[in-house]
Image (spheres, rainbow, N blue to C red):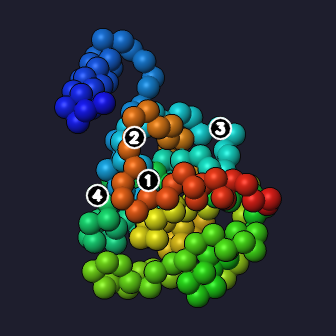
């Protein structure tokens, strides 16, 4: 498919998606993710029932970190995050220094400073997640996620993001990394 054809397909898709809610009363929520930490593109938001590892949770930035994310231009103040669920109830999540562990498997490394040299939030220790908690983490090392704000509450989940039309960005290892985490025995 040529670039022109892809562009026309994208414009057609966007046009249809904008018109559907006007013509049919459907309880469909569509979100656009512009952050490179998850594949950029359009996602359908489904109810957050029966959470599973590897699902993309749509969740507000935790209140204590929302202003920081907005001031540093990580994400606008009221725009929710789209983050992959990597740990659920009963899983142990730890941060020791810069190392993030889930059930004693190293799953990520936290940065101490962002791309502008500003100090990033830090939490330390281990926690076994309760029924109302989950841990969200993306594959990109510069993703603003659980490695900086820790576990999140399941009651805060807006929904689960299901990709409709997405594309990967340079430096994204979503597919291979997700498969690696999924294959681990927790």
Of discs 1 and 4, which sits in the foreground? 1
Instruction: Please tell me how crowded label 1 is: few (under 14), some (14-19), or many (20+) other residues with Cα within 10 Å.
Output: many
- Mark 2 and mark 4 lie on one chain; the one further toward the N terminus is 4
| Res. 107 image quadrant | bottom right
| Rendered image: mark on residue 166 | 2
Residue placed farthest to the front in the image?
2
Where, quadrant-wise, is the N terminus in this rendering? top left
56 is higher (above) or lower (below) than 162: below
112 is higher (above) or lower (below) than 61: below
The answer for how far apart the CA atoms under marks 4 and 3 are is: 27 Å
Can you identify the residue that label 3 sits on?
A: 49
Count of numbered badges drawn on the protein: 4
Residue placed farthest to the top in the image?
23
The answer for how far apart the CA atoms under marks 1 and 2 are is: 9 Å
x and y percentages locating residue 155 in the rendered image: 59, 49
| Res. 132 image quadrant | bottom right
Q: Can residue 24 be spotted in the picture?
A: yes
- Left or right: residue 41 versus residue 53 is left
- Mark 4 and mark 3 lie on one chain; the one further toward the N terminus is 3
Are the residues at dot 3 and dot 2 in contact (C-beta closer than 8 Å)? no
- Mark 1 and mark 3 lie on one chain; the one further toward the N terminus is 1
- Left or right: residue 165 versus residue 138 is left
x and y percentages locating residue 49 in the rendered image: 65, 38
- Mark 3 and mark 2 lie on one chain; the one further toward the N terminus is 3
Instruction: Please tell me how crowded label 2 is: few (under 14), some (14-19), or many (20+) other residues with Cα within 10 Å.
Output: some
């Amino acid at each position: 498919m040529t670039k022109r054809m892809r562009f026309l397909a994208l414009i057609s898709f966007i046009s249809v998606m904008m018109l559907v809610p006007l013509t049919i009363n459907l309880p469909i929520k569509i979100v656009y993710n512009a952050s490179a930490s998850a594949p950029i593109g359009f996602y359908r938001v489904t109810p957050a029932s029966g959470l599973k590892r590897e699902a993309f949770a749509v969740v507000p930035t935790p209140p204590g970190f929302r202003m920081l994310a907005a001031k540093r231009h990580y994400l606008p103040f009221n725009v929710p995050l789209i983050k992959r669920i990597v740990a659920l109830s009963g899983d142990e999540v730890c941060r020791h220094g810069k190392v993030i562990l889930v059930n004693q498997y190293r799953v990520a490394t936290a940065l101490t400073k962002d791309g502008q040299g500003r100090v990033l939030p830090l939490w330390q220790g281990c926690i076994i997640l309760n029924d109302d908690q989950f841990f969200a983490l993306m594959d990109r090392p510069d993703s603003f996620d659980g490695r900086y704000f820790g576990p999140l509450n399941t009651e805060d989940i807006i929904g689960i993001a299901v990709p409709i039309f997405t594309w990967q960005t340079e430096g994204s290892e979503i597919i291979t990394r997700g498969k690696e985490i999924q294959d681990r025995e927790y």
